[in-house]
Image (cartoon, helix red, strand yellow):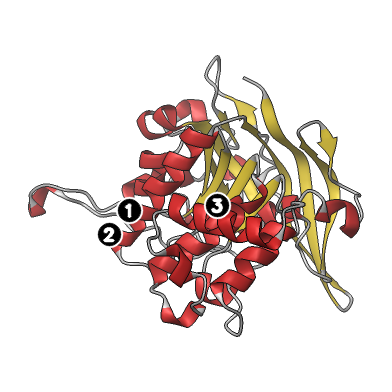
Amino acid sequence: MTSLLEVKNLEVSFRNGKDVFTGVSDVTFHVNKGEILCIVGESGSGKSITTLSVMGLLGKNGAVENGSILFDGVELFGKSEKELDNIRGSKIAMIFQDALTSLNPVFTIGNQMLEAILSHSKLSKKEAEEKAKYLLGKVGLSDTEALLKKYPHTLSGGMRQRVMIAMALAGEPKLLIADEPTTALDVTIQAQIMELLKDLNKELDMSVILITHDMGVVAEMADRVLVMYAGEVVEEAPVNVLFHSPGHPYTKALLRSIPGAGKEEEIKLVPIEGTVPEDYDRIEGCRFLNRCTFAEKDCALFQDFRQNGEEEQFIRCWKYDKL
């Protein structure tokens, strides 16, 4: 299968005065054409930093220090803002966590939709309005003409998120990055948004990177899964392999912490003790060491990211074959 996006040995740092913090290090993964890759992990694992690096949206304090970001055969690392502007929106689009803060409250939906469409096409204003109504209809919204005249605060959370998806589709991107797109939405709306993303993936043959901390969403949506912890990729595998044969202790812990169904006495929810370490860039060995129930002396040494035999599974743990 052909890779649309290839990220190799990505290292991202943030500066605060003289202090430098490495947010993600040695991150390597790829996204195939037409597939859904889920990136999963607790808050503070480096999921958003990784995808913001791909988009070139790290801000003034953040910088890609090392690595390669190859999109459709073109190297993005080192490109200017102007060059990235020709790629962002038209070839790679992103949906952020909170649609209310992502949409401008002082402009109508129509103003914002037209800006997204006109900046990536040579359509007339009238043609752009028709395309805006078409895109809003495509994401499941009705009475699109009236909707274009409304302001973001007059819409429900689910409607705002659908508007964000419609705006992301304006440039007909090959890759859509969705950063926890169902945050603060109720369960029913969450399911509808996920189903919409899945339908768009199939219908448009559009690759999707979905960031989430919900393993239930991963099971439903993913073709492949990237598990991140403390700024590193600790496991990568096809979704069926990950759920049936998880290799890294952190992946196992995530799966054990999922609420199950059945009789109350048969369900044992096992929380992950502790939190993601703050200064994890200073840890030389396994960054999950202080929370791992399988920890041994050699875990304090550098951990390679190794392939599990013939499987399409990669694990950053020296003792995965013993677990």
Q: Considering depth in this image, is 68 or 278 the residue closer to the camera?
A: 68
Q: Residues within 10 Å of mark 1 (few under 14, many from 20)?
A: few
Q: Amino acid at mark 1?
A: Ala
Q: Quadrant of residue 71?
A: top right
Sequence order check, earlier mark of 2 and 3? 2
Q: Considering depth in this image, is 127 or 110 the residue closer to the camera?
A: 127
Left or right? Give the position of 98 relative to 199. Answer: right
| Residue 46 visible | no
Disc number lying in front (3 or 1): 1
Residue denoted by label 1: 191
Q: Residues within 10 Å of mark 2 (few under 14, many from 20)?
A: few
Residue denoted by label 3: 288
Q: Is mark 3 in CB contact (under 8 Å) with mark 1?
A: no
Q: Position of residue 169 (x, y in %)?
A: 59, 50
Q: Amino acid at mark 2?
A: Thr
- Residue 161, compared with residue 301, is above or below; it is below
Left or right? Give the position of 289 relative to 118. Answer: left
Residue occupying image coordinates x 43% and y 41%: 198
Q: Secondary structure at mark 2?
A: helix
**Label number found at residue 188:** 2
Q: Secondary structure at mark 1?
A: helix
Instruction: Residue lying at the far top in this picture: please name it.
Output: 310
Q: Is mark 1 in CB contact (under 8 Å) with mark 2?
A: yes
